[in-house]
């Protein structure tokens, strides 16, 4: 019996040693009253947890914690059950983000809690004509996670971001799961999730509302070489935005490849699916699959002009280099839009090897904003807002493109500038197989 009791005690001790050790921020002096600045107390808990093993920093239920910059550490679970409220005082920040981490390995950010960004308190006022808020000179990002490996962000909510949301720079082996974003639709630059120079990333089961790009993969210009953005899988997300729903770019200074977007619903956007090559990087091996979308016009300051799909390779500046965009598959995608499917390269950067398979778009107009334009921004070379008829599928400076069993459904009351079903220009190797929707008014205009 003594032997059995000894063995039982040993097993229990081993199990307890595996259990996470909790560091409740209240035990480190945090008040949680939503008024007292709790940054120092919470940072103390983070530092103590990082010095332990298998530690969890607990932001408890039913409490509100006012914070500036928090520097998370590797090896901890930052477990957010309560609410973090960000400070509006720049003096409370030690960087350009609220939740920051640098070179942190095995970091987790979890819990069912919330981070409130107080976006309107970082604005100077509302521009009624532009239908958006004007921002102050300084505003923080919600997250800046740099060089982290084996990163998990799960189950949290952030809302009212004054600037970018979840910005991950140079991170490797990342899971973003069941994250809820509730930003304002009328605040600019409040992106949802931004993997930047990241590799081996899965983003799944997220629900996002934001004025700017919802999920955007990019490679910003950096002094450090964080490498390519590659092997990223985005799936089963629900999106509402006034910019692009699922996007690559606009910052494309490094290579971006092996990206898959699938099984997502874009309830509202200014561009459903979007690739914007504007810099010297190479974008390749991109797949959009099993996606439904709505894309519409918004007021003038907002980016995008209701394009269903917009893949563009345009020079940003007259003296800049534009890279290459090639090997793109769009498969089983359907939606409603006020503007074209655009696959538009440029003389200096022709798009190559694109296949659109079972892509179906219902074209109509239902908003009050002026139409008959394409949005080429950002560019100082082309006309930023280009007057252009609304074709179903507009193809410019593209080599080797296949439209297989695609459909353009035209509204009966479509305006006169809704023109060709397919319009290739300055393109080669255009193959059209089993197209549906061609009419006398909306022909396939092969040149």
Image (cartoon, helix red, strand yellow):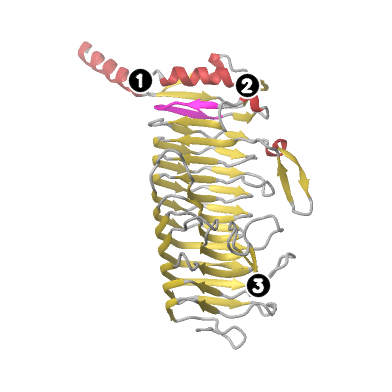
Question: Outermost residue toward the bottom?
Answer: 440
- Quadrant hosting residue 244: bottom right
Residue 58 lies, in percent from the top left, at 51, 24
The answer to whether residue 75 is magenta is yes
Residue 332 lies within the magenta run: no
Question: Earlier along the polypeptide chain: callout 2 or callout 1?
Answer: 1
Q: CA distance from mark 2 to mark 3?
A: 51 Å
Disc 2 and disc 1: Cα gap in Å?
29 Å
- In this view, 443 is above or below 17: below
Q: Residue at x 44, y 28 (%)?
A: 77
Q: Is residue 423 above or below residue 243?
A: below
Dot 1 alpha-carbon crowd within 10 angstroms: few under 14, some 14 to 19, many 20 or more: few
Foreground disc of the pair 2, 3:
3
Residue 63 seen by the camera: no
Q: Is residue 188 left or right of residue 56?
A: right
Name the residue carrying label 2: 32
Cα separation, mark 3 vs mark 1, equals 62 Å
Q: Considering depth in this image, is 439 or 139 the residue closer to the camera? A: 139
Q: Residue at x 50, y 67 (%)?
A: 346
Q: Which residue is mark 1?
A: 16
Q: In this rendered view, identify the residue nearer to me: 409 or 399.
A: 399
Query: Could you say which is closer to the camera, residue 293 or residue 303?
Result: 303
Magenta stretch secondary structure, dominant: strand
Of callouts 2 and 3, the N-terminal one: 2
Circle 3 sits on which residue?
A: 364
User: Tag 1, which secondary structure?
Assistant: helix
Work out which residue is located at the far front of the displayed protein and give it.
Answer: 319
Tell me which segment is drawn in magenta.
70-81
Mark 3 or 1 closer to N-term?
Answer: 1
């Amino acid at each position: 019996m003594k032997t059995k009791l000894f063995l039982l005690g040993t097993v229990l001790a081993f199990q307890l040693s595996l259990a996470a050790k909790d560091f409740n921020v209240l035990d480190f002096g945090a008040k949680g009253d939503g008024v007292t600045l709790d940054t120092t107390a919470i940072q103390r808990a983070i530092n103590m947890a990082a010095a332990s093993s298998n530690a969890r920093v607990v932001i408890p239920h039913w409490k509100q914690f006012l914070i500036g910059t928090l520097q998370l550490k590797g090896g901890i679970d930052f477990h957010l059950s309560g609410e973090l409220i960000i400070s509006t005082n720049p003096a409370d920040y030690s960087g350009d983000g609220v939740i920051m981490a640098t070179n942190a390995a095995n970091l987790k950010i979890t819990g069912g809690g919330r981070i409130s960004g107080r976006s309107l308190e970082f604005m100077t006022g509302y521009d009624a004509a532009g239908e958006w808020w004007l921002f102050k000179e300084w505003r923080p990002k919600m997250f800046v996670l740099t060089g982290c490996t084996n990163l998990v962000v799960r189950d949290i909510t952030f809302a009212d971001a004054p600037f970018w949301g979840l910005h991950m720079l140079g991170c490797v082996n990342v899971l973003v799961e069941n994250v809820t974003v509730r930003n304002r639709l009328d605040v600019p630059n409040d992106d949802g999730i931004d993997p930047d120079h990241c590799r081996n990333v899965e983003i799944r089961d997220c629900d996002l509302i934001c004025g700017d790009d919802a999920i955007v993969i990019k490679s910003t210009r950096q002094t450090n070489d964080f490498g390519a953005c590659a092997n990223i899988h985005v799936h089963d997300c629900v999106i509402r935005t006034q910019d692009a729903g699922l996007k690559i770019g606009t910052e494309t200074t490094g290579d971006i490849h092996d990206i898959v977007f699938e099984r997502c619903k874009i309830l509202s956007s200014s561009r459903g699916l979007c690739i914007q090559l504007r810099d010297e990087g190479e974008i390749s091996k991109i797949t959009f699959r099993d996606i439904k979308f709505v894309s519409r016009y918004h007021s003038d300051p907002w980016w995008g002009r209701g394009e269903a799909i917009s893949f563009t390779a345009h020079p940003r500046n007259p003296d800049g280099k534009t890279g290459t965009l090639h090997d793109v598959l769009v498969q089983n995608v359907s939606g409603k839009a006020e503007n074209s499917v655009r696959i538009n390269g440029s003389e200096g950067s022709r798009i190559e090897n694109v296949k659109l398979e079972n892509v179906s778009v219902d074209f109509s107009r239902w908003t009050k904003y002026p139409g008959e334009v394409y949005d080429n921004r950002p560019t100082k070379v082309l006309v930023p807002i280009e007057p252009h008829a609304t074709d179903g599928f507009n193809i410019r400076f593209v080599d080797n493109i296949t439209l297989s069993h695609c459909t353009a459904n035209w509204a009966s009351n479509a305006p006169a500038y809704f023109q060709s079903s397919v319009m290739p220009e300055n393109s080669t190797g255009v193959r059209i197989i089993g197209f549906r929707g061609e009419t006398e008014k909306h022909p396939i205009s092969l040149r």
